[in-house]
Amino acid sequence: MSSCQSILNNTFSRIATLPDSGAVASYIPELAKVSPDYFGVCITTIDGHVHTAGDAKTKFSIQSIAKVLSLSLVLSKLGDELWKRMDFEPSGTAFNSLVQLETENGIPRNPLINAGAIVICDILCDLFKDPKRELLDYLRMVSGIKNLEYSEAIATSERLTGYRNYALVNFIKSFGNIKNDCDQVIDLYFHLCSIEMTCEEIAYTFGFLANDGKQLNTDYIIVTPSQSKRINAIMQTCGFYDEAGEFAFKVGLPGKSGVGGGMIALLPHQYTIATWSPKLNAHGNSYRGMKFMELFTDETQDTVF
Ligand code: DON
């Protein structure tokens, strides 16, 4: 991708000059404080090139993007045992929906919706004596950010307004699919979602999923090639909730969004691409991030399809 930087620059200026649309997430009050005008992009190739545009070095709340990393930790520890606790099917519903759990006996559709990520947090509470510490150590290792911390301001803000997540953890527990204390599990979940990174850091962090499970630069094995393939498949089918089909249709890459306005997508064996623009569309996905990735893959024609 020698012309990567110029395609990135052109795509970035085209999207930056179009009117933005949607709204910054406000159901977590701390997120509503973020300026809607930020726009950053970073592309990292697996052979070590980094291309950026805009606010690629500003930290923001990565929110649900972190769910891919909690999945990779649990999958690397449990292997296929994980699938006794949840499925790997798209939900076709909003990220915080409760409806399918009623008829599906508390088994979440997949690990990237809130219900699934909460069960992942329950498993982490079983696996570790100090799950909050172990999760943070893992996120530091995978991202290479040695001083990474949870944002207590975001975790607290989310706790104070997290009515649906409290409902989810209690509802799932009523089916027996939460083993630990609901307060401990949901506290871990809120901390997972509170992680802050820049586009540049996210693009590097997710490099292992474009590199058969091995960390970029170090070749450290984070997950096996087969687990990497499966995580990418889950991102492709479930990473954008009820907009996953549209993302596959328009962008054609496995990816994941967060309500902080961040998005990550990747082309195995080639590159990762992280975007950040806080205004969200009606499905909770970044408006400009979606537009950017669609135009970028139209220009490069580098997609999984
Ligand atoms: O639990 C929540 O509602 C948020 N912490 C995470 C939601 C999220 O990022 C969904 N993504 N698009």
Image (cartoon, helix red, strand yellow):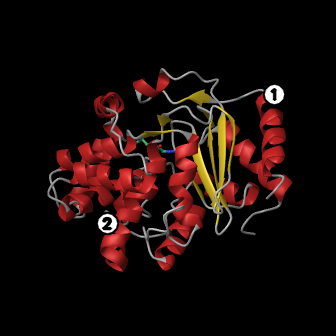
Q: Nearer the viewer, residue 37 or 43?
A: 43
Image spot of residue 135 (x, y percent):
30, 53
Q: Badge 2 is on which residue?
A: 105
Q: Is residue 305 above or below residue 293?
A: below
The answer, for residue 190, to whether it is visible in the render is: yes
Q: Which label lies toward us, 2 or 1?
A: 1
Classify 10 Å Cα crowding around label 2: few (below 14), some (14-19), many (20 and above): some
Q: Which mark is residue 247?
A: none
Q: How many marks?
A: 2
| Residue 214 against residue 285 in the figure, above or below | below
Q: Please determine whether, in this image, residue 96 is positioned above or below residue 206.
A: above
Q: Is residue 64 left or right of residue 117?
A: right
Mark 1 secondary-structure assignment: helix
Q: Amino acid at mark 1?
A: Thr
Q: Position of residue 138 (x, y in %)?
A: 33, 56
Q: Amino acid at mark 2?
A: Asn
Residue underneath mark 1: 17
